[in-house]
Image: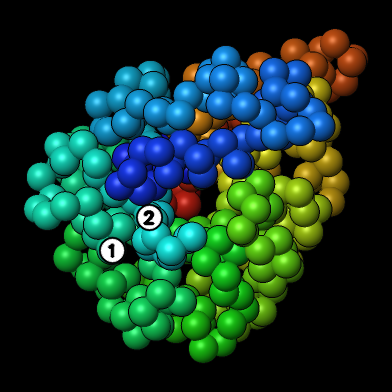
């Protein structure tokens, strides 16, 4: 089974210009690394346009576009982005196209309704994860929204963004009631516990080790460390070996390393006691580095690097596991 365990959809703000500016800030050094933007001063508008990152942003991605860009995929996890204030503006997943039938103007407080509507568009292909921000209207409101998203909207998990929203995933007042509710609802929690190139994001709140207390207090909670903690990958891997119900998801990390480094990463997991069965393939689609087809091919062909280096190949069932079988078992979509 081929599963993208981490993708996004729709828009992050009602205003495309704001969304483009947000994306440019996070992408500046990616373009600089590729040599297409000046390295020692901020780019002009013309230089941004020439780089391919237009001020109009990216085309709107709805269910049809996501399915189109995931050929051959059995399932696609779509993650809501919960509302937060950034530069005085409320951002979060919104349907600026208005095609999903969620009533009212685009409103990030309805992020879970939009994702549920995406799932309804192709229920056999999309798996929807809700999102809540306990720092926005308090933890009681966040827990109530999570319960609604699962029991009324039918969403299958929850994605949390503490570092972007400036709260700690180890905060006993703000975060723990959300984990408690997720455990009671029987859903997994995916947490962006990794870096971000968005300047406003708080790196010190992104450290994977902040989840250790979560693992100690919620022994049965299923936790997915998004992006495998990149750039603190070893810290995240150690959490996976320590906590029986912790898993890692590879998006972003996968896009930022060569295929040879991917082989090296996968080869050192099991010697450090992280079964490859604990890792899930994900893409962070849509974005210019996050082409699901190219990223899946990078994993599928990783043994070409083993051949070139005269190393034993990774067993095919391990690669099949990474690409989707592990996640299917994790979510109960396939037999153990
Ligand atoms: Zn993401």
Which residue occupies 62% across, 27% down?
44
Residue 291 location in percent, x, y?
A: 51, 23
- The residue that label 1 is drawn on is 109
Q: Is residue 2 above or below residue 104?
A: above
- The residue that label 2 is drawn on is 92
Q: Could you tell me which secondary element the residue under label 2 belongs to?
A: loop
Q: Is residue 33 above or below residue 196?
A: above
Residue lying at the far right of the rendered structure: 310
Residue 105 location in percent, x, y?
A: 16, 52
- Residue 27: image quadrant is top right
Cα–Cα gap, marks 2 and 1: 8 Å
Question: Closest to the observer: 115 or 47?
Answer: 47
Res 215 label = none
- Residue 225: image quadrant is bottom right
Residue 294 location in percent, x, y?
A: 56, 18
Question: Closest to the observer: 257 or 181?
Answer: 257
């Amino acid at each position: 089974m081929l599963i993208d365990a981490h993708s996004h959809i729709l828009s992050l703000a009602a205003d495309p210009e704001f969304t483009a500016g947000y994306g440019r800030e996070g992408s500046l050094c990616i373009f600089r690394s590729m040599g297409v933007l000046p390295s020692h001063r901020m780019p002009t508008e013309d230089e941004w346009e020439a780089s391919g990152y237009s001020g109009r942003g990216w085309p709107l991605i709805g269910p049809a576009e996501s399915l189109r860009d995931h050929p051959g995929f059995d399932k696609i996890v779509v993650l809501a982005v919960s509302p937060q204030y950034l530069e005085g503006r409320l951002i979060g997943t919104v349907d600026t196209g208005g095609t999903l039938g969620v009533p009212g103007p685009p409103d990030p407080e309805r992020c879970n309704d939009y994702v549920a509507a995406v799932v309804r568009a192709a229920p056999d292909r999309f798996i929807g994860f809700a999102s809540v921000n306990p720092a926005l209207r308090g933890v009681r409101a966040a827990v109530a929204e999570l319960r609604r998203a699962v029991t009324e909207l039918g969403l299958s998990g929850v994605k949390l963004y503490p570092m972007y929203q400036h709260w700690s995933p180890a905060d006993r007042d703000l975060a723990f009631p959300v984990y408690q509710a997720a455990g009671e609802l029987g859903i997994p929690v995916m947490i962006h516990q990794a870096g971000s190139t968005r300047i406003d994001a708080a790196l010190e709140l992104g450290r994977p080790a902040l989840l250790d207390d979560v693992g100690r207090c919620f022994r049965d909670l299923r936790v997915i460390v998004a992006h495998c903690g990149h750039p603190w990958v070893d810290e995240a891997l150690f959490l996976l070996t320590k906590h029986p119900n912790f898993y890692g998801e590879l998006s972003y990390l996968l896009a930022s390393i060569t295929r040879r480094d991917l082989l090296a990463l996968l080869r050192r997991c099991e010697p450090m006691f992280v079964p490859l069965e604990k890792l899930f393939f994900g893409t962070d689609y849509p974005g210019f580095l996050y082409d699901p087809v190219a990223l899946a091919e990078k994993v599928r062909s990783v043994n070409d690097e083993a051949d070139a280096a005269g190393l034993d190949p990774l067993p095919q069932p391990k690669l099949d596991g990474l690409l989707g079988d592990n996640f299917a078992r994790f979510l109960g979509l396939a037999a153990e």
